Amino acid sequence: MTPSRAKALFQQWTAQQKLSPQQLNQALKLANVTPTPQHWFSFLDKLLLANGGGLLLIGVMFFFAFNWQEITRFHKFALIECLVIASLAGYAYYFHKASAKFFVLAASVFVGVLLAFYGQTYQTGADTWQLFFMWALLITPWAMLSQLASLWLLWLLLVNLSLFLYYSVFGGIFGVLFSGDTLQMALFAFNSMALLVWELAAIRHEWLKGRSEVRLLAMTTGFNMTWLMLSFIFSHGDKTAYVPIVYGLWLAIFYGVYRYKINDLFMLAGASFSVIILSTAWLGEVLFKAKDGAVLFLLALWVIFTSGIVIRWLKGLAQELHHD
């Protein structure tokens, strides 16, 4: 039983007078719902480490930006390479501590800085997408060995940027397809596969069971699919008939997995938000074609109506999950 479910159950027992208010705090402590001082110290330690690490990386970037003209080419390369080596040395030295994983994340960021500086210094003529692709390729072994979810998230971001920039150069995947929806479909396919692999891997690997990264990845797939459906709704030329079919399959799979397998209300709320957006867009397209003067008023009513239904459904589902 998760802490949130245990807390809801204790509150229900208190409301039913099966548990006195004086016993509630003791029950929460016994069920490990109320954080202990050790939990607070662990949380603050990770929070301060993340903030300090982020500020250090930003400070390094601003250092190079501010002193760019005064530093010679040799010293620029030496400093960046030393930062990569120092980060890996810190990771090796603090290998058995949780804070060690910050060093490998920092080294991965510095590799990108080194590649960007190399391309700018020697004017290699390479396209921008190649920078991000090579960046992702070079840090792949570190991502596989470090067991750090944030580093895998960085890797996925770099691959997404590579696909986006490749499309902007060649006009389509492999330079053959020229549809404006090709990019979103490619990103949707890649991110959906990544989401599937992440959820399956989280079953066996404890370090992947955090929900923040996987929810961000699911938001990306939802954005790609919603974009495709909006393009389908407002397109006045040849429409790709497979887009609604793909969207229906994605919605059904999304609901089945996160309603009955994993029980994630955030995911269901995101899918419901997508449905509200698309239904409002379709209704607006129909009403604007009919040149109805009350279009905006009707759309506002529709948003209020559908939002109320979704909120009520999610509240009922939350109570149902808490009582399981």
Image (tube, rainbow, N blue to C red):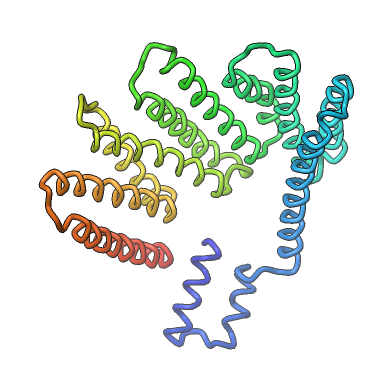
Q: Which residue is drawn at 52% across and 37% down?
A: 198
Q: Which residue is drawn at 54% across and 36% down?
A: 201
Up the image or down, 44 lies above or below 70; here it is below
Query: Picture coordinates of residue 271 (x, y %)?
Result: 36, 48
Viewer-closest of 87 and 277:
277
Q: Residue at x 10, y 47 (%)?
A: 290
Placement of the C terminus among the 4 image quadrants: bottom left
Query: Picture coordinates of residue 323 (x, y %)?
Result: 41, 67
Indicate left or right for 28 with 179 as reference. Answer: right
Indicate left or right for 18 with 283 as reference. Answer: right
Indicate left or right for 211 with 94 as reference. Answer: left
Viewer-closest of 103 and 13:
103
Up the image or down, 42 lies above or below 168; here it is below
Q: Quadrant of residue 299?
A: bottom left
Query: Picture coordinates of residue 91 (x, y %)?
Result: 82, 36
Numbered marks: total: 0
Q: Residue pushed farthest front?
A: 69
